[in-house]
Image (cartoon, rainbow, N blue to C red):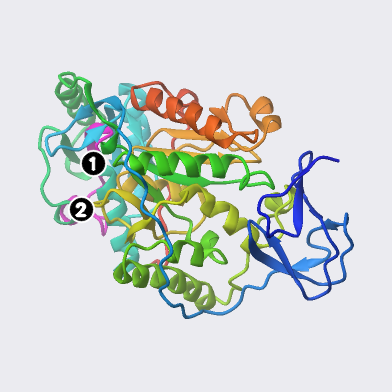
Amino acid sequence: MDCITINEKDNVCVNLETGHKIAICDIEKGADIIKYGYPIGFATENIKKGDSVHSHNMKTKLGDILSYEYKPTFEELAPKKPFTIKAFVRENGDIGIRNDIWIIPTVGCVNSIAKQLAEKTGAIYFSHPYGCSQLGDDMKVTQLVLRGLINHPNAGGVLVLGLGCENNNLGEMKAVLGLWNENRVKFLSVQDCEDELEQGIALINELKEYTSKDKREEVSVSKLKIGLKCGGSDGFSGITANAVVGKVTDEICAMGGTAVLTEVPEMFGAETVLFDRCINKEVFDKSVNLINNFKQYFKDHGEPVSENPSPGNKEGGITTLEEKSLGCVQKGGTAPVVDVLNYGETLTKSGLNLLNGPGNDIVSITNLSAVGCHLVLFTTGRGTPLGGPVPTVKIASNDTIATKKNHWIDYSAYGFDNQAKADELLDLIKRVANGELTKNEVQGNREIAIFKDGVTL
C-alpha cells in the first residue's frame, strides 16, 4: 500500500489509492490526530499503527467562539517579474479578460424575459429569485452583489432588466450602483414598455455596437484578480489541487496580482494559519470578526459550528471540518493576508484577500465574481459542472475524476511535483486570460446565487 505523509509532525498518512487516512504509529484514545502538521480531531478509541483513521474512530474538536492573540509569523513574498496577458482595458483602468454582454435581472420575476433575450441575441443572462419581498440588510446584500456584477470588467456591456414594481426597482438599483457609463450599461423596466423583447433586443444591439470597438491589449498580470474555490473535495484535495493552487497564489501575489480566499466555514479549525499571516493588527481584527461572526451565524440558527464535511467529502476520505479546512486554506499558499472584505465590497489591495461568505459553491463563485475576480480556480475531487459569471477553471485533485469528467475538468493537479504542476496551471491561466474558453464556458454552465439571511414578505 502506497501512502504519503504531508508533514513531519503528522501521525497519519494518506493512502494514494483511496485518499483515506492510515495511522503511521499507535495513537491513544483522546490523543490528537495530526495532518498538515495540525490537529484535525481526536481519537475516540485506541488506534493501532496501520489502522484506517476515519469517522469510526476520530471526532472533531471544534466548538465555541474563541478569542485569539495576534502573533504574526509570516514572511513577505519575494517580488517576481510579472508576465503579460492580453486583456480589455476599461475606462477606469481595470481590465477585463472577456468582453461579454450580460443581462442582469434586478428581480426574479423577469428571469424568463432575460432568458428569451439571451436566446435571441447571444447575450449571457444570470437568473436569481431575489430583488422583491426582501427587507433590510438581506435586500442590501442582493443589491451589492448585483452592483458588483453590473460593474464587472469582464462584461463589455450590461442590460439591467427590471420589472417595475419590485423593492429593488431600477431607481433603487441605480442609487446603489452610483456612477455608470451610459454606453456600457442600459436599463429596461418591462412594465413600462409595450414590447419588452423588441426594446430589449434593440438595447442589446446598442451594447454590441459599443463593445465591437474593444480590443485586447498587452497588460501586466499584476492587474489580474483570481478567486479561490474548492468543492466536492476529497482526501487528495489538500495534497494536490489545493496545494498546487497555493503555489499559483504565491506566484500571482509575488507578481503584484490579487487572490481571494472565501468559504469562511471552511476556515474553521484552520483560522490561526491565516491569522498569523495578517499584515497588521487591523487586518487581524477583521479576520477574527470574519470567523467569529460566521460561527455566531451558525449558533443563531441552532446549528453546530462543525456541521461539515458533506457526505461526498467523507466518502473521499475527509473526516472532520478541521481536516477539510486545513486542506481548503492550502489554496491561499503562504502569502500575507492584506485585507478582509464583506459581501459586495470591491477589491482595492493587491495580494491575498479574505472574503466573507459561506462554502456553498454557487454562492461562493458569485461572491468572488461580484468582488471583482476575473476568473476562479475551482479545485475538486468529486467533480462538478458548475460555472459562474467569470471563467471557472476546474482543477481535479485526482486523475480518475479528470478522466471520467473530461468535459468538466480543465486540468488535473494529481501528482506530487506541485511546483511543476503550478507552472503548468499558470500557463493555463495565461491562456484563459488571453481568451481560451474554460470547460464551463464551452458547456454554457454559468449560474449565480445570492446569500440570503433575512425576512421574506
Q: Is residue 137 above or below residue 169?
A: below
Q: Is residue 452 above or below residue 371?
A: below
Instruction: Please indicate whether residue 4 sits to the left or right of residue 200 in the image.
Output: right
In the rendering, at what x and y percent does residue 232 appear? 62, 46
In the rendering, at what x and y percent does residue 174 appear? 15, 51
Q: Which residues are magenta?
A: 153-173
Question: Which of the 4 image quadrants contains residue 29?
Answer: bottom right
Quarter containing the C terminus: bottom left
- Nearest the viewer among 304 and 457 is 304
Q: Which mark is residue 160?
A: 1
Q: Residue at x 41, y 61 (%)?
A: 277
Instruction: Please indicate whether residue 216 sits to the left or right of residue 425 in the image.
Output: left
Do callouts 2 and 1 mark residues in contact (Cβ within 8 Å)?
Answer: yes
Q: Is residue 22 above or below residue 278?
A: above
Q: Say which amino acid is labelled 2.
A: Met
| Mark 2 crowd level (few <14, some 14–19, many ≥20, 10 Å Cα) | many
Q: Is 167 part of what is drawn in magenta?
A: yes
| Mark 1 crowd level (few <14, some 14–19, many ≥20, 10 Å Cα) | many
Q: Is 346 part of what is drawn in magenta?
A: no
Mark 2: which secondary structure? helix
Q: Is residue 369 above or below residue 55?
A: above
Q: Which mark is residue 254?
A: none
Alpha carbons under labels 2 and 1: distance apart: 9 Å
Mark 1: which secondary structure? strand
Q: Residue at x 54, y 66 (%)?
A: 268
In the rendering, at what x and y percent does residue 248 appear? 45, 39
Q: Residue at x 84, y 72 (%)?
A: 28
Question: Which of the 4 image quadrants contains residue 87?
Answer: top left
Label 2 belongs to which residue?
Answer: 173
Residue 215 appears in view: yes
Q: Residue at x 39, y 73 (%)?
A: 289
Count how many numbered circles sit on residues in the image: 2
